[in-house]
Amino acid sequence: MKKLLLPLLSILLFTACQKEVTTTKAQDEIAGATANKQTKFFVCHYDAITATWKTIQVDQSALAGHLAHGDVQGECSAVQTVTICDQVWMVKNLDVDTYRDGTTIPQAATEAEWIAAGTAGTGAWCYYENSTANGTVYGKLYNCYAVNDPRGLAPTGWHIPTTLEWVTLADCLGGDIFGNDVAGGKLKSVGTIEAATGLWYAPNTDATNSSGFTGFPGGLRIASGTFYSIGQVGLWWGSDLQSTSLGFLFGLSSYHADIFHISDSKQLGTSVRCLRD
């Protein structure tokens, strides 16, 4: 009987040892996979070849470079935000075609449609040069009548920033929106078109995007319906009005390191960036 028990005991011990080795190996593999997973980050990446945004995964070492070039951490399907001091901004320009209550905002593609909307004082939007590819990158251009429509252009929980809120942003970054400052460079995405590294024409002065705002040069559409300055200027409406016909705008330029503040016709079409309530 003892002779039978000894081989049986040996088999049981061998099996237990094998199970322990297998379990330890599996745990090591899981731990290794977890460690590798923790070094990966989802990034909403702009593919210049296909002119589309797509979700990719990058190593931690590559993350800073992607963010500096205008990519956004997180999946493209999520609303991307960045906190600058105590303000929470959307990272991408607004791209909605309805007001908050669900009412459709008319698209004014042709020059005649754009002029008609401005003359009537009604909200309208378009893509730069009516290109959906431009819309994918820069969002829509809205006239100021859409911005100030009482039905609300910004999604629920968001609003179009006031002049004071834009001033707060510039001050936070060490600048002065009413004079020479350095805030613009901290707000612009980096790289140049000439070097195939960005969306701005050279020189893209002092651009670092250190704030994470990721300002793109979406250009503008004037009252007559002509498009100007994509790659050179980014303009965003404020919610304040200077008069019944003029609205306030805040902008970045490839040729300067500041953020500038102007007023212009409400018929102008520019980008919109939202601030969390």
Image (cartoon, rainbow, N blue to C red):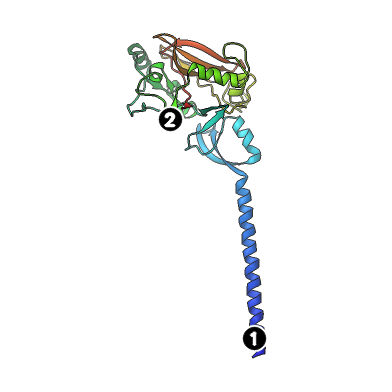
Kind of residue sitting beneath label 2:
Gly
- Report the residue marked by disc 1: 5
Q: Is residue 44 left or right of residue 21?
A: left
Mark 1 vs mark 2: in front: 2
Quarter-wise, where is residue 60 in the image? Answer: top right
- Residue 113 placed where, x, y %? 35, 17
Using the image as rendered, state which of residue 159 and residue 133 is in the foreground. Answer: 159
Dot 2: few (<14), some (14–19), or many (≥20) neighbours within 10 Å? few
- Residue 89 placed where, x, y %? 51, 27
> At x 61% / y 46%, what residue is drawn?
38
> At x 55% / y 30%, what residue is drawn?
83
- Residue 203 placed where, x, y %? 63, 19
- Residue 153 placed where, x, y %? 39, 24
Quarter-wise, where is residue 124 in the image? Answer: top left
Q: Is residue 144 left or right of residue 172?
A: left
Using the image as rendered, state which of residue 96 and residue 86 is in the foreground. Answer: 86
Considering only order in the chain, which callout, 2 or 1, is on the residue closer to the N terminus? 1
Is residue 18 placed above or below 5 in the rendered structure? above
**Farthest bottom residue?**
1
> At x 60% / y 44%, what residue is drawn?
40
Q: Secondary structure at mark 1?
A: helix
- Report the residue marked by disc 2: 157
Kind of residue sitting beneath label 1:
Leu
Marks 1 and 2, how far apart in space? 74 Å
Is residue 79 placed above or below 224 in the rendered structure? below
Q: Secondary structure at mark 2?
A: loop
Quadrant assignment for the N terminus: bottom right
Is residue 59 placed above or below 120 in the rendered structure? below
Dot 1: few (<14), some (14–19), or many (≥20) neighbours within 10 Å? few
Is residue 222 placed above or below 9 in the rendered structure? above
Using the image as rendered, state which of residue 198 and residue 10 is in the foreground. Answer: 10
